[in-house]
Image: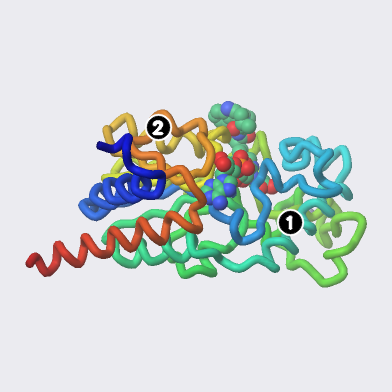
Amino acid sequence: MFARLNMNEKMERLIESAAEIIAAARRIAVLTGAGVSAESGVGTFRDAQTGLWSRFDPQQLASQEGFAADPGRVWRWYMHRLEMVERARPNPGHAALAALEAMTPTFTLITQNVDDLHERAGSRNVLHLHGRIERFHCNGCGLPYTLRMEDRDAPMPPTCTFCTDYIRPSVVWFGELLPAQELAEAQRAAETCDVFLVIGTSGVVYPAAHLPVMAKRRAAPIIEVNPEESALSEMAEIWLSGPSGALLPRLVEAVRLRRAGQENPR
Ligand code: BV8
Ligand code: ZN
Protein backbone atom coordinates (compact mmCIF):
# COMPACT_ATOMS: atom_id res chain seq x y z
CA MET A 1 0.00 0.00 0.00
CA PHE A 2 1.82 3.10 -1.33
CA ALA A 3 0.36 5.42 1.30
CA ARG A 4 1.94 3.36 4.13
CA LEU A 5 5.47 3.60 2.67
CA ASN A 6 7.85 6.17 4.16
CA MET A 7 9.13 9.03 2.03
CA ASN A 8 12.28 7.22 0.92
CA GLU A 9 10.38 4.03 0.01
CA LYS A 10 7.92 6.16 -1.98
CA MET A 11 10.78 7.87 -3.82
CA GLU A 12 12.35 4.45 -4.46
CA ARG A 13 9.08 3.25 -6.04
CA LEU A 14 8.77 6.39 -8.18
CA ILE A 15 12.40 6.09 -9.31
CA GLU A 16 11.77 2.46 -10.30
CA SER A 17 8.65 3.45 -12.31
CA ALA A 18 10.58 6.24 -14.04
CA ALA A 19 13.52 3.89 -14.73
CA GLU A 20 11.18 1.37 -16.34
CA ILE A 21 9.92 3.99 -18.82
CA ILE A 22 13.41 5.35 -19.55
CA ALA A 23 15.05 1.90 -19.92
CA ALA A 24 12.47 1.00 -22.58
CA ALA A 25 13.03 4.28 -24.50
CA ARG A 26 15.22 4.38 -27.62
CA ARG A 27 14.95 8.16 -28.11
CA ILE A 28 15.29 10.39 -25.03
CA ALA A 29 14.94 14.21 -24.97
CA VAL A 30 15.94 16.20 -21.89
CA LEU A 31 15.27 19.87 -21.07
CA THR A 32 17.40 21.32 -18.26
CA GLY A 33 17.14 24.67 -16.49
CA ALA A 34 19.15 26.53 -13.88
CA GLY A 35 18.16 24.00 -11.17
CA VAL A 36 20.52 21.37 -12.60
CA SER A 37 23.45 23.74 -11.87
CA ALA A 38 22.19 24.84 -8.44
CA GLU A 39 24.18 22.16 -6.56
CA SER A 40 27.29 23.33 -8.41
CA GLY A 41 26.93 26.67 -6.67
CA VAL A 42 25.65 28.53 -9.75
CA GLY A 43 22.61 30.49 -8.50
CA THR A 44 19.39 29.65 -10.35
CA PHE A 45 18.21 32.39 -12.67
CA ARG A 46 15.56 33.68 -10.33
CA ASP A 47 17.59 33.35 -7.19
CA ALA A 48 20.95 34.18 -8.78
CA GLN A 49 19.97 37.54 -7.37
CA THR A 50 21.86 37.08 -4.14
CA GLY A 51 23.79 39.81 -2.39
CA LEU A 52 24.13 43.11 -4.23
CA TRP A 53 22.16 41.79 -7.22
CA SER A 54 19.12 40.88 -5.12
CA ARG A 55 17.46 44.25 -5.77
CA PHE A 56 17.53 43.89 -9.57
CA ASP A 57 15.06 41.98 -11.75
CA PRO A 58 17.03 39.45 -13.86
CA GLN A 59 14.46 39.81 -16.61
CA GLN A 60 15.31 43.50 -16.83
CA LEU A 61 19.06 42.91 -16.78
CA ALA A 62 18.84 40.18 -19.45
CA SER A 63 17.35 42.47 -22.13
CA GLN A 64 18.31 45.09 -24.72
CA GLU A 65 16.38 47.68 -22.71
CA GLY A 66 18.32 46.87 -19.55
CA PHE A 67 21.62 46.96 -21.47
CA ALA A 68 20.77 50.29 -23.12
CA ALA A 69 19.65 51.78 -19.80
CA ASP A 70 22.80 50.79 -17.92
CA PRO A 71 25.43 48.87 -19.94
CA GLY A 72 27.87 48.98 -17.02
CA ARG A 73 25.43 47.36 -14.58
CA VAL A 74 24.51 44.58 -17.07
CA TRP A 75 28.19 44.01 -17.92
CA ARG A 76 29.15 43.69 -14.24
CA TRP A 77 26.21 41.28 -13.64
CA TYR A 78 27.46 39.00 -16.42
CA MET A 79 31.08 39.19 -15.24
CA HIS A 80 29.81 38.21 -11.74
CA ARG A 81 27.85 35.25 -13.16
CA LEU A 82 30.73 34.22 -15.48
CA GLU A 83 33.04 34.06 -12.46
CA MET A 84 30.44 31.88 -10.61
CA VAL A 85 30.33 29.52 -13.60
CA GLU A 86 34.13 29.33 -13.93
CA ARG A 87 34.48 28.60 -10.18
CA ALA A 88 31.74 25.92 -10.34
CA ARG A 89 32.28 22.21 -10.95
CA PRO A 90 29.76 19.90 -12.64
CA ASN A 91 27.68 18.08 -10.01
CA PRO A 92 26.54 14.39 -9.97
CA GLY A 93 23.35 15.42 -11.79
CA HIS A 94 25.35 16.65 -14.80
CA ALA A 95 27.44 13.47 -14.71
CA ALA A 96 24.34 11.25 -14.56
CA LEU A 97 22.91 12.91 -17.70
CA ALA A 98 26.23 12.32 -19.51
CA ALA A 99 26.13 8.64 -18.44
CA LEU A 100 22.52 8.30 -19.64
CA GLU A 101 23.51 9.78 -23.01
CA ALA A 102 26.30 7.20 -23.34
CA MET A 103 23.81 4.32 -22.86
CA THR A 104 21.05 5.68 -25.16
CA PRO A 105 20.95 5.33 -28.98
CA THR A 106 19.30 8.71 -29.60
CA PHE A 107 19.76 11.28 -26.85
CA THR A 108 19.20 15.05 -27.11
CA LEU A 109 20.13 17.31 -24.20
CA ILE A 110 18.42 20.68 -24.56
CA THR A 111 19.49 23.31 -22.03
CA GLN A 112 18.26 26.80 -21.15
CA ASN A 113 21.45 27.27 -19.14
CA VAL A 114 24.21 29.51 -20.41
CA ASP A 115 26.94 27.68 -18.43
CA ASP A 116 29.18 24.91 -19.85
CA LEU A 117 28.72 22.44 -16.98
CA HIS A 118 26.97 19.82 -19.14
CA GLU A 119 29.94 19.83 -21.53
CA ARG A 120 32.44 19.73 -18.67
CA ALA A 121 30.56 16.69 -17.26
CA GLY A 122 31.00 14.85 -20.59
CA SER A 123 27.67 15.48 -22.35
CA ARG A 124 28.28 15.47 -26.11
CA ASN A 125 25.14 16.56 -27.93
CA VAL A 126 24.06 19.72 -26.02
CA LEU A 127 21.67 22.25 -27.54
CA HIS A 128 22.01 25.70 -25.91
CA LEU A 129 18.70 27.46 -26.55
CA HIS A 130 19.73 30.61 -24.66
CA GLY A 131 23.38 30.89 -25.76
CA ARG A 132 26.66 30.71 -23.82
CA ILE A 133 27.88 33.12 -21.10
CA GLU A 134 31.55 32.46 -21.87
CA ARG A 135 31.17 33.75 -25.46
CA PHE A 136 30.92 37.41 -26.55
CA HIS A 137 30.07 39.46 -29.61
CA CYS A 138 29.38 43.07 -30.61
CA ASN A 139 25.80 44.19 -29.86
CA GLY A 140 25.92 46.36 -32.99
CA CYS A 141 27.59 44.39 -35.80
CA GLY A 142 27.78 40.90 -34.29
CA LEU A 143 31.58 40.63 -34.60
CA PRO A 144 32.79 37.88 -32.21
CA TYR A 145 34.94 39.13 -29.30
CA THR A 146 37.52 37.38 -27.12
CA LEU A 147 37.29 38.49 -23.48
CA ARG A 148 40.52 40.01 -22.11
CA MET A 149 41.61 39.87 -18.46
CA GLU A 150 41.12 43.62 -18.01
CA ASP A 151 37.48 43.35 -19.19
CA ARG A 152 36.53 41.22 -16.18
CA ASP A 153 36.57 43.95 -13.59
CA ALA A 154 35.99 46.88 -15.94
CA PRO A 155 33.08 49.19 -14.97
CA MET A 156 31.82 49.28 -18.59
CA PRO A 157 31.63 46.70 -21.41
CA PRO A 158 34.47 46.81 -23.97
CA THR A 159 33.67 48.42 -27.34
CA CYS A 160 33.89 46.90 -30.79
CA THR A 161 37.06 47.67 -32.78
CA PHE A 162 34.99 47.64 -35.97
CA CYS A 163 31.82 49.66 -35.19
CA THR A 164 32.56 51.00 -31.65
CA ASP A 165 29.25 49.59 -30.28
CA TYR A 166 29.28 47.76 -26.92
CA ILE A 167 30.38 44.13 -26.61
CA ARG A 168 27.81 41.82 -24.94
CA PRO A 169 27.66 38.17 -23.80
CA SER A 170 26.43 35.74 -26.49
CA VAL A 171 23.29 34.83 -24.56
CA VAL A 172 19.67 35.22 -25.74
CA TRP A 173 18.02 38.16 -23.97
CA PHE A 174 14.26 38.46 -23.37
CA GLY A 175 12.58 39.64 -26.57
CA GLU A 176 15.42 38.20 -28.69
CA LEU A 177 15.04 35.24 -31.03
CA LEU A 178 16.46 31.86 -30.05
CA PRO A 179 19.13 30.38 -32.35
CA ALA A 180 17.09 28.88 -35.21
CA GLN A 181 19.21 25.75 -35.69
CA GLU A 182 19.22 24.76 -32.00
CA LEU A 183 15.49 25.47 -31.63
CA ALA A 184 14.63 23.41 -34.73
CA GLU A 185 16.70 20.46 -33.47
CA ALA A 186 15.10 20.75 -30.02
CA GLN A 187 11.61 20.77 -31.55
CA ARG A 188 12.45 17.70 -33.66
CA ALA A 189 13.64 15.90 -30.49
CA ALA A 190 10.38 16.83 -28.74
CA GLU A 191 8.40 15.54 -31.75
CA THR A 192 10.22 12.19 -31.98
CA CYS A 193 11.24 11.21 -28.44
CA ASP A 194 9.85 8.19 -26.55
CA VAL A 195 10.28 10.02 -23.23
CA PHE A 196 10.91 13.69 -22.31
CA LEU A 197 12.80 14.49 -19.09
CA VAL A 198 12.40 17.97 -17.54
CA ILE A 199 15.13 18.75 -14.99
CA GLY A 200 15.44 21.84 -12.78
CA THR A 201 13.34 24.38 -14.63
CA SER A 202 10.44 26.57 -13.47
CA GLY A 203 8.99 26.10 -16.97
CA VAL A 204 7.95 29.74 -17.40
CA VAL A 205 10.24 30.86 -20.23
CA TYR A 206 9.07 30.38 -23.80
CA PRO A 207 9.51 28.93 -26.35
CA ALA A 208 11.70 26.46 -24.33
CA ALA A 209 8.79 25.65 -21.98
CA HIS A 210 6.70 24.68 -25.00
CA LEU A 211 8.95 21.74 -25.86
CA PRO A 212 7.57 19.34 -23.21
CA VAL A 213 4.06 20.36 -24.32
CA MET A 214 4.96 19.22 -27.85
CA ALA A 215 6.08 15.84 -26.47
CA LYS A 216 2.98 15.51 -24.27
CA ARG A 217 0.71 16.17 -27.26
CA ARG A 218 2.03 12.99 -28.90
CA ALA A 219 1.59 11.09 -25.61
CA ALA A 220 5.31 10.84 -24.90
CA PRO A 221 5.56 10.51 -21.08
CA ILE A 222 7.14 13.44 -19.23
CA ILE A 223 9.32 12.77 -16.19
CA GLU A 224 10.27 15.79 -14.02
CA VAL A 225 13.02 16.20 -11.42
CA ASN A 226 12.59 19.33 -9.29
CA PRO A 227 12.38 19.94 -5.50
CA GLU A 228 9.53 22.41 -6.14
CA GLU A 229 6.39 22.20 -8.25
CA SER A 230 6.90 23.90 -11.62
CA ALA A 231 4.61 25.13 -14.38
CA LEU A 232 5.18 21.75 -16.06
CA SER A 233 4.54 19.44 -13.07
CA GLU A 234 0.87 18.79 -13.74
CA MET A 235 1.63 17.36 -17.18
CA ALA A 236 4.35 15.05 -15.82
CA GLU A 237 3.71 11.32 -15.70
CA ILE A 238 6.13 11.12 -12.78
CA TRP A 239 7.46 14.06 -10.69
CA LEU A 240 10.54 13.12 -8.63
CA SER A 241 10.49 15.91 -6.07
CA GLY A 242 14.04 16.48 -4.90
CA PRO A 243 17.43 17.85 -5.99
CA SER A 244 18.71 16.59 -9.36
CA GLY A 245 22.24 16.13 -7.99
CA ALA A 246 20.89 13.46 -5.63
CA LEU A 247 18.05 11.95 -7.69
CA LEU A 248 19.54 11.73 -11.20
CA PRO A 249 22.40 9.38 -10.18
CA ARG A 250 19.85 7.04 -8.49
CA LEU A 251 17.56 7.19 -11.53
CA VAL A 252 20.33 6.52 -14.08
CA GLU A 253 21.73 3.64 -11.96
CA ALA A 254 18.23 2.07 -11.91
CA VAL A 255 18.07 2.47 -15.72
CA ARG A 256 21.55 0.93 -16.12
CA LEU A 257 20.55 -2.12 -14.04
CA ARG A 258 17.38 -2.59 -16.09
CA ARG A 259 19.28 -2.23 -19.36
CA ALA A 260 21.87 -4.80 -18.13
CA GLY A 261 19.00 -7.08 -17.16
CA GLN A 262 17.54 -6.64 -20.67
CA GLU A 263 20.85 -7.59 -22.29
CA ASN A 264 21.47 -10.74 -20.24
CA PRO A 265 17.99 -11.94 -19.20
CA ARG A 266 18.34 -14.54 -16.38
C1 BV8 B 1 11.56 34.88 -27.90
C2 BV8 B 1 19.65 33.93 -21.11
C3 BV8 B 1 10.67 35.58 -29.98
C4 BV8 B 1 20.09 35.18 -20.44
C5 BV8 B 1 17.25 33.63 -20.75
C6 BV8 B 1 5.64 33.01 -26.05
C7 BV8 B 1 6.42 32.76 -27.19
C8 BV8 B 1 7.62 33.45 -27.39
C9 BV8 B 1 8.07 34.37 -26.43
C10 BV8 B 1 7.30 34.60 -25.31
C11 BV8 B 1 6.09 33.94 -25.12
N1 BV8 B 1 5.56 34.36 -23.95
C12 BV8 B 1 6.40 35.27 -23.40
C13 BV8 B 1 7.45 35.46 -24.21
C14 BV8 B 1 8.57 36.38 -23.94
C15 BV8 B 1 9.71 35.68 -23.19
C16 BV8 B 1 9.21 34.84 -22.06
O1 BV8 B 1 9.14 33.62 -22.16
N2 BV8 B 1 8.88 35.49 -20.95
C17 BV8 B 1 8.44 34.74 -19.78
C18 BV8 B 1 9.19 35.20 -18.55
C19 BV8 B 1 6.94 34.91 -19.67
N3 BV8 B 1 10.49 34.86 -24.09
C20 BV8 B 1 11.46 35.47 -24.79
O2 BV8 B 1 11.64 36.67 -24.77
C21 BV8 B 1 12.36 34.58 -25.65
N4 BV8 B 1 12.45 35.18 -26.95
O3 BV8 B 1 10.71 34.07 -27.76
O4 BV8 B 1 11.76 35.61 -29.07
C22 BV8 B 1 10.21 36.98 -29.99
C23 BV8 B 1 11.07 37.93 -30.51
C24 BV8 B 1 10.63 39.26 -30.55
C25 BV8 B 1 9.35 39.61 -30.04
C26 BV8 B 1 8.52 38.61 -29.49
C27 BV8 B 1 8.96 37.28 -29.45
C28 BV8 B 1 13.77 34.55 -25.08
C29 BV8 B 1 13.81 33.76 -23.81
C30 BV8 B 1 15.27 33.58 -23.36
C31 BV8 B 1 15.60 34.60 -22.29
N5 BV8 B 1 16.96 34.36 -21.79
N6 BV8 B 1 18.52 33.42 -20.37
C32 BV8 B 1 20.76 34.91 -19.15
O5 BV8 B 1 20.75 33.74 -18.65
O6 BV8 B 1 21.29 35.88 -18.60
S1 BV8 B 1 16.03 32.87 -19.88
C33 BV8 B 1 16.51 32.58 -18.27
O7 BV8 B 1 15.39 31.93 -17.66
C34 BV8 B 1 17.66 31.60 -18.09
O8 BV8 B 1 18.26 31.14 -19.28
C35 BV8 B 1 17.00 30.40 -17.42
O9 BV8 B 1 17.52 29.23 -17.84
C36 BV8 B 1 15.62 30.58 -17.94
C37 BV8 B 1 14.55 29.77 -17.35
O10 BV8 B 1 14.69 29.78 -15.99
P1 BV8 B 1 15.01 28.36 -15.30
O11 BV8 B 1 16.16 27.72 -15.98
O12 BV8 B 1 13.75 27.58 -15.23
O13 BV8 B 1 15.50 28.84 -13.91
P2 BV8 B 1 14.57 29.36 -12.72
O14 BV8 B 1 15.47 30.09 -11.77
O15 BV8 B 1 13.37 30.04 -13.26
O16 BV8 B 1 14.05 28.02 -12.04
C38 BV8 B 1 14.99 27.16 -11.43
C39 BV8 B 1 14.24 25.86 -11.16
O17 BV8 B 1 15.17 24.95 -10.62
C40 BV8 B 1 13.13 26.01 -10.15
O18 BV8 B 1 11.98 25.32 -10.61
C41 BV8 B 1 13.68 25.34 -8.89
O19 BV8 B 1 12.68 24.69 -8.14
C42 BV8 B 1 14.58 24.31 -9.51
N7 BV8 B 1 15.68 23.86 -8.64
C43 BV8 B 1 16.32 24.56 -7.67
N8 BV8 B 1 17.29 23.77 -7.13
C44 BV8 B 1 17.25 22.58 -7.78
C45 BV8 B 1 16.24 22.63 -8.75
N9 BV8 B 1 15.95 21.60 -9.56
C46 BV8 B 1 16.67 20.48 -9.41
N10 BV8 B 1 17.67 20.34 -8.51
C47 BV8 B 1 17.98 21.38 -7.68
N11 BV8 B 1 18.97 21.23 -6.78
ZN1 ZN C 1 30.65 45.99 -33.88
* Residue 206, position as x, y percentages in the image: 54, 34
Task: Give the quadrant of ligand 1.
Answer: top right
Residue 213 badge: 2
Check the image and report above or below for 57 versus 149. above
Quadrant in which the N terminus is drawn? top left
Residue at 38 percent of width and 54 percent of height: 108
Quote the CA–CA distance across marks 2 and 1.
30 Å
Regarding residue 10, the answer to whether it shows in the image is yes
Q: Nearer the viewer, residue 113 or 21?
A: 21
Amino acid type, label 1: Arg
Q: Is mark 1 within 8 Å of ligand 1?
A: yes
Quadrant location of residue 260?
A: bottom left
Quadrant location of residue 221?
A: top left
Residue at 41 percent of width and 37 percent of height: 212
* Residue 19, position as x, y percentages in the image: 28, 52
Mark closer to the chain start, 2 or 1: 1
Structural crowding at the residue carrying mark 2, measured as other residues with C-alpha within 10 Å and reported as few (<14), some (14–19) or many (≥20): some
Element under disc 1: helix
Q: Residue farthest to the front? A: 4
* Residue 113, position as x, y percentages in the image: 58, 51
Regarding residue 33, the answer to whether it shows in the image is no
Left-right relation of 99 to 74: left
Element under disc 2: helix
Quadrant location of residue 239?
A: top left
Residue 56 badge: none
Say which residue label 1 marks: 81
* Residue 60, position as x, y percentages in the image: 77, 36
Q: Residue farthest to the right? A: 155
